[in-house]
């Protein structure tokens, strides 16, 4: 199923808190929604979004998805080439989110922060996720997470860019745990007070922690946006 807004409709999908974990939105594409409202809005509730493509959309906060409250689960999403003032791919506030087996690429925050993800006072658990080639005018080309908790497992963050701080991750007043990841981008908290626990990961420039390395990840074709790993 394809929902094509033809650049004249914004915010066609609204989950308003009545949905439980048993509510699953599965297997559709939403594209070309242009306006002030995100194409997918989650306002409280615990719905699951599964196997969605969200592409070429725009919104004021969250070019692809805007989540306010609740604890949704996002599985198998491809969120690409969306734009917003803040949170080019996803914007969250005051919520708890599981993001699994997903890709955020080519999204942009064209005025503020968080090219891929902008998180405010939220908890994120990311597993098997690619965050690549996103950009922000302000902080956090890949992820901006203020006053948030962020857990990354088997996540690759690379090729993101910002005009300010944290091409990969900007995390003021946040708690971050990283395990078995590739962070091939700058990470920056603009302070010394934000806890950052990294283990068994490949960190550009190196980072002290058990099992960490700093070695060329051998991406297949990063100049062409291919951040899969070379065979062998």
Image: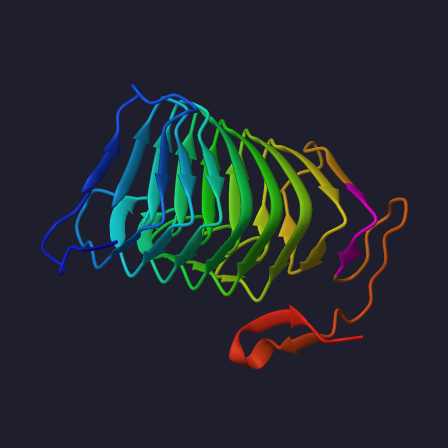
Q: What residue is at 47 percent from the left and 46 percent from the top?
A: 117
Quarter of the N terminus within the rendering: bottom left
User: How far from the left and from the top, in percent, is residue 196?
Assistant: 73, 38
User: How far from the left and from the top, in percent, is residue 154?
Assistant: 69, 50
Q: Examine the image and state in which quarter residue 192 appears.
A: top right
User: How far from the left and from the top, in percent, is residue 132?
Assistant: 54, 62
Q: Examine the image and state in which quarter residue 215 appears.
A: bottom right
Does 178 sit left or right of 164 as displayed?
right
Does 209 sit left or right of 64 as displayed?
right
Residue farthest left in this picture: 8
Q: What residue is at 52 percent from the left and 54 percent from the top?
A: 142
Does 206 sit left or right of 137 as displayed?
right
Predominant SS of the magenta segment: strand
Q: Is residue 42 above or below residue 35?
A: above
Q: Is residue 148 above or below residue 78?
A: above
Number of marks in the rendered image: 0
Q: What residue is at 43 percent from the left and 64 percent from the top?
A: 106
User: How far from the left and from the top, in percent, is residue 140?
Assistant: 52, 51
**Is 73 inside the magenta-drawn segment?**
no
Q: What residue is at 59 percent from the left and 41 percent from the top?
A: 126
Q: Which residues are magenta?
A: 198-203
């Amino acid at each position: 199923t394809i929902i094509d807004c033809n650049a004249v409709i914004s915010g066609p999908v609204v989950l308003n808190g009545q949905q439980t974990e048993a509510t699953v939105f599965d297997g559709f594409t939403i594209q070309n929604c242009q306006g002030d409202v995100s194409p997918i809005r989650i306002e409280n509730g615990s719905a699951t979004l599964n196997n969605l493509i969200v592409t070429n959309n725009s919104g004021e906060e969250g070019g692809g998805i805007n989540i306010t409250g609740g604890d949704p689960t996002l599985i198998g999403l491809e969120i690409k080439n969306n734009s917003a003032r803040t949170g080019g791919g996803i914007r969250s506030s005051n919520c708890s989110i599981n993001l699994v087996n997903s890709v955020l690429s080519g999204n942009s925050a064209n005025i503020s922060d968080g090219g891929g993800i902008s998180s405010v006072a939220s908890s994120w658990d990311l597993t098997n996720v690619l965050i690549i080639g996103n950009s922000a005018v302000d902080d956090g080309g890949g992820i901006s997470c203020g006053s948030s908790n962020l857990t990354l497992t088997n996540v690759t963050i690379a090729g993101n860019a910002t005009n300010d701080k944290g091409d990969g991750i900007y995390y003021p007043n946040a708690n971050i745990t990283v395990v078995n990841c590739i962070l091939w981008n700058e990470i920056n908290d603009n302070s010394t007070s934000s806890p950052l626990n990294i283990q068994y990961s490949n960190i550009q420039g190196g980072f002290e922690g058990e099992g960490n390395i700093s070695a060329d990840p051998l991406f297949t074709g990063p100049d062409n946006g291919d951040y899969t790993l070379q065979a062998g």
